[in-house]
Image (tube, rainbow, N blue to C red):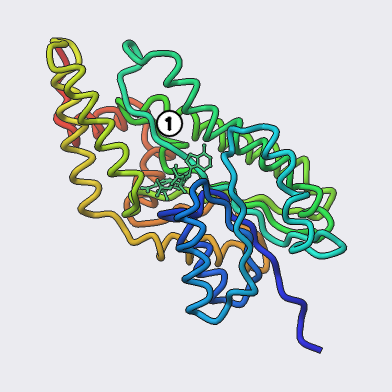
Amino acid sequence: MPPPTRTLLVTGASTGIGRAVAKAALARGRRVVATVRRAEDESALRDHARAAGSGEALEVLRLDVTDEEAVAAAPGRVAAFLGPEGRLDELVLNAGIAVPGPLERLPLERLRRQFEVNVFGLVACLQAFLPHVRRARGRVVLVSSQAGRLAFPMLGAYSASKYAVEALGDALRLELAPFGVDVVLVEPGAVATEIWERSLADASDLRAELEDDADYAPLARAVHRGFERAVRHAIPAEECAAAVLDACEAKRAPIRVPVGRDARRNLRLARWLPARWVDALVRRELGIRRR
Ligand SMILES: NC(=O)c1ccc[n+]([C@@H]2O[C@H](COP(=O)([O-])OP(=O)(O)OC[C@H]3O[C@@H](n4cnc5c(N)ncnc54)[C@H](OP(=O)(O)O)[C@@H]3O)[C@@H](O)[C@H]2O)c1
């Protein structure tokens, strides 16, 4: 008898890493539930699956992770696809945004938005789908970031949200061990996805907003240049998706998976160098001068 087909759910699959995870999981023979927010993204994913001959293996769920009621109702909405036992082998919590801005000037509502999506939305999805993962003694993958262990200027809100994801992952790993559920923190460096265009657009708005701000305009310009450099060296989303799926399939679940040369290097430095040295490296990289 062939082994039962595994089912993976990934949030934020309209673009970038999430979309690449959904496609790669279908290509590796999984049944996939992909969440998106827009009708056109649902059609694009369905068209892709049909063209690849795996139309039956895909279910698309329209879901905003900040909509608590919709998230709570989500498992019911995919119950038929999950089957009578409602088993979910892999839950990849990936949906995320990056809100740039200097913390001194950042409107609190933007900070809240950052946490609504990356932290509260992630926990809401976790709570909604965990019973299904427990039934399968499956695996939870949290898409964190190198910024979850190394904070960058102008990305304090994003870094804070990813530090929170790291802590959630560490606690969850201990809480779920008795149930045979593994938890993996994936920590990508720069990956070529829409998040950069979105953040660069936000960063351009920010640069315009800070144009006359003598304190922060130079930093906003430096970080904007840093973003542009990072985008040029970013790895493809497919490479990150492969790392996510490898982490799902590894016999022994890894605890943390830095993805990309930059993440591996930066996380090694952050771990072993004194914080002042790390600050000096980041300042040099971004051309930030002390006054
Ligand atoms: N790209 C990188 O360099 C990088 C590095 C480290 C970590 N990451 C992490 O990787 C994850 C995926 O990001 P990405 O780079 O693939 O960026 P992306 O292409 O912008 O994808 C982000 C995904 O999250 C979804 N999303 C945003 N807000 C949502 C909400 N309220 N409800 C549901 N879905 C929502 C987006 O959907 P819409 O299209 O509907 O907005 C999209 O599908 C994020 O957690 C990000 O922090 C990325």
Q: Quadrant of ligand 1?
A: top left
Q: Is residue 161 above or below residue 110?
A: below
Residue 158: x and y in percent read 42, 31
Query: What is the number of callouts on the image?
Result: 1
Nearest the eye: 124 or 176: 124
Residue 229: x and y in percent read 18, 46
Nearest the eye: 19 or 174: 19
Nearest the eye: 168 or 108: 108
Nearest the eye: 85 or 172: 85
**Residue for point 75% across, 49% down:** 75
Q: Residues within 10 Å of mark 1 (few under 14, many from 20)?
A: many
Mark 1 C-beta to ligand 1 under 8 Å: no
Work out which residue is located at the far right of the displayed protein and give it: 84
* Residue ID for mark 1: 159
Q: Secondary structure at mark 1?
A: helix
**Residue for point 41% across, 44% down:** 267
Q: Label 1 amino acid?
A: Ser
Residue 257: x and y in percent read 51, 54
- Taking the image as shown, residue 234 lies to the left or right of residue 172, namely left
Residue 260: x and y in percent read 37, 57
**Residue for point 12% across, 12% down:** 212
Quadrant containing the C terminus is top left
- Taking the image as shown, residue 73 lies to the left or right of residue 119, namely right
- Taking the image as shown, residue 158 lies to the left or right of residue 137, namely left
Quadrant containing the N terminus is bottom right
Q: Is residue 215 above or below residue 171?
A: above
Which quadrant of the structure image shows residue 171?
top right
Work out which residue is located at the far bottom of the displayed protein and give it: 1
Which quadrant of the structure image shows residue 65?
top right
**Residue for point 19% across, 36% down:** 285
Q: Is residue 158 above or below residue 170?
A: above
